[in-house]
Image: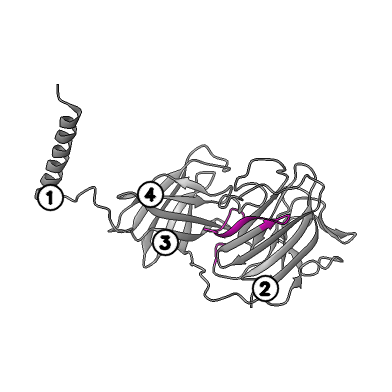
Amino acid sequence: MYSQVNMRLIGTLLVTASLCLNSLRGEEDPFVKIDPPALTGSWDCTVQDGDLTYPSWFHVELSGYRTLVGSYVGQFGSARPISNVAFNAETGGFRFELPPQWEKRTKNVVVEGTLKDGSIKGVTFNDEGKVISFQANRAPSLEREGKTKWGKTIKLFNGENLNGWIPRHADIPNGWVVRDGLLINETPGNDIMTKKKFTDFKLEAEFRYPEGSNSGIYLRGRHEVQIEDNYGMEINSHRIGGVYGFLTPYLNAAKKPGKWQRLEITLIGRLVTIELNGKKIIERQNIPGITSGALDSDEGAPGPILVQGDHGPVEFRKLELTPAK
């Protein structure tokens, strides 16, 4: 019987012989890492489904020698992993699929497209199986240089009325009212957002909710910081203080429902720092892309502060923003 050392030696010789034979045949060495293909990186997408337009996002990266993997944000749900992306470097064509999340379908979500001249045109399928189109551009880096200088603090909510705010959907009743100095989502069903748009800022919000409620604040209308009754629960990116589906807080600093709570958020480019009830729970973390429910995928543009109102009741007594100069 061969010893383990001899078996290892024989295995090494066989691998070496195979590589040499491939070289003599002119075949590519499968164990030589290739340069990242042109498809790698993050892509901001705009999807057209009949009269409906909605944003989407995906990211592709090289894993190991030559496997392409990534993550995807669709019309619903949160960021989810892509286990394999097929890409033809000669034609620019690519394809990936992944299981449904909150979509009302049983078949996989399929995305196909072609990368040409730095942009993408492609197709996917809606829940009825109809082919719909999308186009995508590279997501901007949003890197900032130098030290941030801050302007004058703005009261987004004046405590008296809805001046400066508009409902997200004009065809859905607006359930937001002002009573006793509070901004209240009295009848959940519609989001509300500022008329003004912002780029980099510091945001302070004081809020409370009843047991089991769910809301959120969208930064620039694109990145949701979760507000939800998660007192005492294990932390994850879908719970209070997390950037939905992307960034998980260091700890759960939530109070019990019915208590006033305080969020302090600083967003500079993609870097976000979040404090909940005086405790820093996310510090200078990079937000990879848009979260589901975003207004659009134009990440390089200013955007409003949007408060989610389609899930559950929530009250705010303070919403103030300090913009960067």
Place of residue 181 in the rendered image (x, y in percent of width and height, measured from the top left): 88, 62
Asked which quadrant contains residue 41, the reply is bottom left
Residue 323 versus residue 86 in the image, above or below? below
Place of residue 83 in the rendered image (x, y in percent of width and height, measured from the top left): 41, 44
Number of marks present in the image shown: 4
**Foreground label between 4 and 3:** 4
Q: Earlier in the sequence, mark 4 or mark 3?
A: 4
Asked which quadrant contains residue 161, the reply is bottom right
**Residue located beneath label 3 in the image:** 120
**Foreground label between 1 and 4:** 1
**Foreground label between 4 and 2:** 2
Q: Secondary structure at mark 4?
A: loop
Give the distance between the C-alpha atoms of the residues marked 4 and 3, in whole angstroms.
Answer: 15 Å
Near mark 2 (Cα within 10 A), the count class, few <14, some 14-19 or many ≥20, is many
Place of residue 61 in the rendered image (x, y in percent of width and height, measured from the top left): 40, 54
Give the distance between the C-alpha atoms of the residues marked 1 and 4, in whole angstroms.
Answer: 27 Å
Tell me if residue 231 can be seen. Answer: yes
Q: Are marks 2 and 3 in contact (CB under 8 Å)?
A: no
Near mark 4 (Cα within 10 A), the count class, few <14, some 14-19 or many ≥20, is many
Q: Amino acid at mark 1?
A: Ser
Tell me if residue 196 can be seen. Answer: no
Q: Amino acid at mark 4?
A: Val
Q: Earlier in the sequence, mark 1 or mark 4?
A: 1
For residue 23, the mark is 1
Of helix, strand and loop, which mostly describes the magenta segment?
loop
Residue 278 part of the magenta-drawn span: yes
**Residue located beneath label 2 in the image:** 323
Q: Are marks 2 and 1 in contact (CB under 8 Å)?
A: no
